[in-house]
Image (cartoon, rainbow, N blue to C red):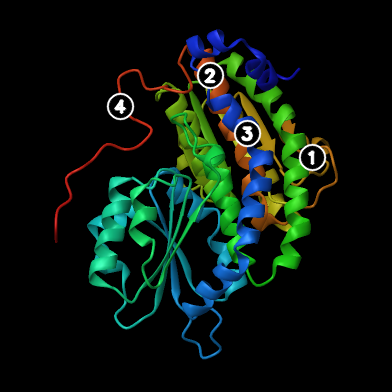
Amino acid sequence: MDPLSNLLAEPAARRAQRGTVHTPREIAQQPDTWQKTFSLLASRQDEIAAFLKATGLMSASGRRPTVLLIGAGTSDYIGRCLHHLLRAEWQCEVIPVPSTSLLTDFSDYLVPDKPYLWIHFSRSGDSPEGVAVLEQALAELPDMHHLVITCNAGGREIGMVQGRPNCLGIVLEDATNDRGLAMTSSFSNMVLAGQLLAHTFTAESYEPIFQEIVEAGRDFLPRAAEIAEKLAREGYSRACFVGSGLLAGVAQESALKLLELTAGQVKTMSESTLGLRHGPMAALDEETLFVSFLPGSEARRNYEIDLLREIGEKRLVRTRVAVAGSGGALEQSGAAEHFLAPRGQWKIPDFYLPVVDVIFGQLMGLFSSLQLGFMPDTPSPNGAISRVVQTIEIYQA
């Protein structure tokens, strides 16, 4: 069995002792939960389409809304894995904005007399910044449209929009409401929900892509687990994740997963592929694990391959990993020590790769956490971080 399956097969008492009751299962269950998210949104397609039309999204007059994708931390990275896709499908401006920035600079993100649709992502729906931002918007801008996507039916955000005009709430299956500290299946399922939203009016074009995502994810999981467990045993004090386009969001989320699951013992960074050379490359050393998320487009992929080769020629890091969730022959490039891709000939378009690719970052976090003696379900022994960010003081402008 692969290392992830081995963790899942351990006796319950052993898993409780090691803090692996939730996190390994929540990573492993992702392809199954993707199916449930697809079915859930498909069952509400007419309702969602009516709501989006009411926002002016399909307007031919040019008054389509500006869409803000809102969340904090991992939930912010959801928007960064979606904005180009939504912009292409909806033909309007789509901007990922952290709720942490909206809270402090609320009015700076608004242009008077412009229509807006705010899409809020939150595993718990109880993030203090997210709740405060939604409260302020509902009170001060009653005509604005809001769509809340969450994994927790009991969260405050979903309760705030229920029954309100101009608002819609979507609660994913309870299985996606990760009980471990780190967001894993909640992240990929909310990204998938965003992809489904993008194709509300073009569902027939998305369904074959979705089927490839699920098949690629099932194949990817055990192979990614084997490489992640091996790299965790080698021990790295640093890791750098890079990606372009929407894969930059995957790089950010992977860096966060490894950082939080190792309680900061592995220092991480993320950067765009071409941006790394403009200063951040100075941080690479022989204790750094370097991970590049490769797009399927050959023209785009060449930039990643060139960077991997340059880092190898300069001997900047000990190990390079090339991750390509869409498959394809990578080994022949000779640009990395490890190549990770599904074995099938799936050709998932670049816009849809984040759902599969992020699994490697999640698994690096899981196995590095265990290697360092932490409990992945609760990896912050000093209480520096928690599953739901603690309540903060909210100050009125």
- How far, Cα to Cα, is label 4 from label 1? 40 Å
Inspect the image, locate mark 3, and give the three-letter code of the amino acid beneath it. Phe
Are dots 3 and 1 in contact, CB under 8 Å?
Answer: no
| Sequence order check, earlier mark of 2 and 4 | 2
Quadrant assignment for the N terminus: top right
- How far, Cα to Cα, is label 2 from label 1? 33 Å
Q: Nearer the viewer, mark 3 or mark 2?
A: 2
Q: Which of marks 4 and 1 is in front?
A: 4
Identity of the residue furthest to the bottom in this view: 61
- How far, Cα to Cα, is label 3 from label 1? 17 Å
| Sequence order check, earlier mark of 3 and 2 | 2
Instruction: Give the residue at mark 3.
Output: 360
Tell me the tag on residue 384: 4
Q: Nearer the viewer, residue 394 or 88?
A: 394
Q: Which of 54 and 266 is in front in this view?
A: 54
Q: Which of 45 and 90 is in front in this view?
A: 45
Q: Does residue 166 appear to the left or right of 274 in the view shown?
A: left
Question: What kind of element bears circle 1?
Answer: loop
Question: What kind of element bears circle 2?
Answer: loop
Inspect the image, locate mark 2, and give the three-letter code of the amino acid beneath it. Thr
- How far, Cα to Cα, is label 4 from label 3? 25 Å
Instruction: Give the residue at mark 1.
Output: 330
Q: In this view, does 215 lie above or below 44?
A: above
- Is residue 309 something one can see in this rendering? no
- Is residue 338 something one can see in this rendering? yes
| Sequence order check, earlier mark of 2 and 1 | 2
Q: In this view, does 315 lie above or below 249?
A: above
Based on the displayed image, in which of its 4 quarters is residue 168 positioned? Answer: bottom left
Instruction: Give the residue at mark 2.
Output: 20
